Image (cartoon, grey):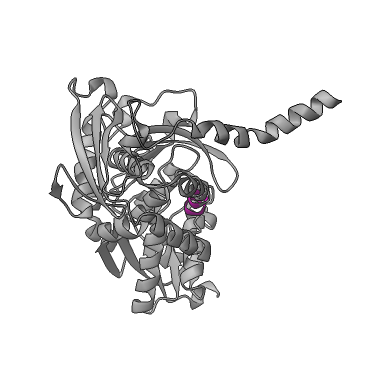
Amino acid sequence: MPRGEIQKVVLAYSGGLDTSIIVPWLRENYGCEVICFCADVGQAEELHGLEEKARLSGASKVIVRDVREEFIRDYILPTLQAGAIYERKYLLGTSFARPLIAKHQVEIAAQEGADAVAHGATGKGNDQVRFELSYAALNPALRVIAPWREWAIRSRQDALDYAAEYHVPVTATAEKIYSRDRNIWHISHEGGLLEDPWNEPAEDMFMLSVAPEAAPDQPEYIVLDFEAGVPLGVNGQQMGLVALLEYLNDAGGRHGIGRVDLVENRLVGMKSRGVYETPGGTILYTAHRELESLVLDRETLRVKDQIALDYADLVYNGRWFTPLRTCYDAFVRATQANLTGAVRLKLYKGQVQVVGRYSPHSLYREDLATFGADEIYNQHDAEGFIRLYGLPLKVQALLRNQQ
């Protein structure tokens, strides 16, 4: 579709420098109406004044949707239940927010009669893939505009100069050190001194957590309750998903929990370094995994761990809306049926330690595991088991001795 044939675009808008200048750029280069859409996924103060800023930038309409509960229920929880962690450390905070934003963009495009969608992701990162695969899966008829792959802007100063030329209100400065992405699950930090992987992150960079050495000298104990793999409340008090995650973020951040420094492999082929803060998410992953160890049998847990690696890749690589993820979700949901119970955790100096666990569906039997006298387990049975289990080793040894 030629540029002049695009009449209306729905832009994934954050209110930051990049998406702010995209509004006049789209109007100038495509001659189209621009509708700004912002998904409230828990950016907190970043949303302040966003609607006015978008209108002053030239948007014809601004749509803000609070999708925090949907984000947790339909994107975070399935990933948590799958046990998906990318490259051993990353809890996928940015990755699973993008398909949610894209889904609402596509819905709004249909409602508003738009013929295109746009995003502010760069041509070097993963987000361009996550947005555009989601668009393709949900409405391939929409034209996709990715300004960073088209315009002549190449630096932060270029962007600031463009904003000044077109009278776009921005609070950014050329001295901004880090590129950040924040939602209710995490905040990521990239750029600046982090571009050298030898440099230790500066303490004033962190926004959600205190340094572990500055955390309280006394530990805090909390009990997380689950039903069918879904967290229900803390310390016996039931909470909604948003309130629960906010509570855990506060508690984890207060004790310096959830900091990750990672050199990761981007989908586009390069390595990048990111520092992530995921205080509440780290607590939830720890508790959920522990409850699984109590309830799931060995073979199911083993297969689930194998799926977790693939699931993490699917999420990271932007393949959320795929048949394979749907099939994985069906398996994972089946494993969560008996995942009801409680986990007691100790928060202290950057660490979250499991100190107790309970489930009415526990496969743990004290009368079997005890070192004391018991009448259930006959220890003589182990002799025949070991002979059969070691039979291949015995056959190999006999063969070697015959040679």
Magenta residues: mostly which secondary structure? helix
Q: Is residue 177 visible?
A: yes
Please give left or right for residue 154 compared with residue 223 in the image.
Answer: right
Give the percent coordinates (x, y) of residue 88.
48, 37
Q: Is residue 315 magenta?
A: yes
Tell me: 25 left or right of 183: right
Give coordinates of residue 397: x percent, y percent: 75, 27
Q: Of residues 46 and 287, which is closer to you in this image?
A: 287
Placement of the N terminus among the 4 image quadrants: bottom right
Is residue 331 found inside the magenta-colored segment of the image?
no
- The percent position of residue 223, horizontal first and vertical second, equals 20, 39
Residue 58 seen anywhere in this rendered image of the structure: no
Q: Please identify the residue farthest to the left as the structure is shown.
A: 237
Q: Could you say where residue 24 lies in the image, as x and y percent from the top left?
A: 38, 62
- Rendered residue at 26%/64% (across/down): 65
Q: Quadrant of the C terminus?
A: top right
77 left or right, relative to 312: left
In the rendered image of this protein, does residue 361 appear above or below residue 403? below
For this rendering, which residue is in front, 275 or 253? 253
Point 24% across, 53% down: residue: 47
**Residue at 39%, 33% in the rendered image:** 260
Image-quadrant location for residue 8: bottom left
Q: Which residues are magenta?
A: 311-316
Q: Is residue 56 above or below residue 250?
A: below
Task: Spot the residue most to the right.
Answer: 403
Residue 51 figure quarter: bottom left
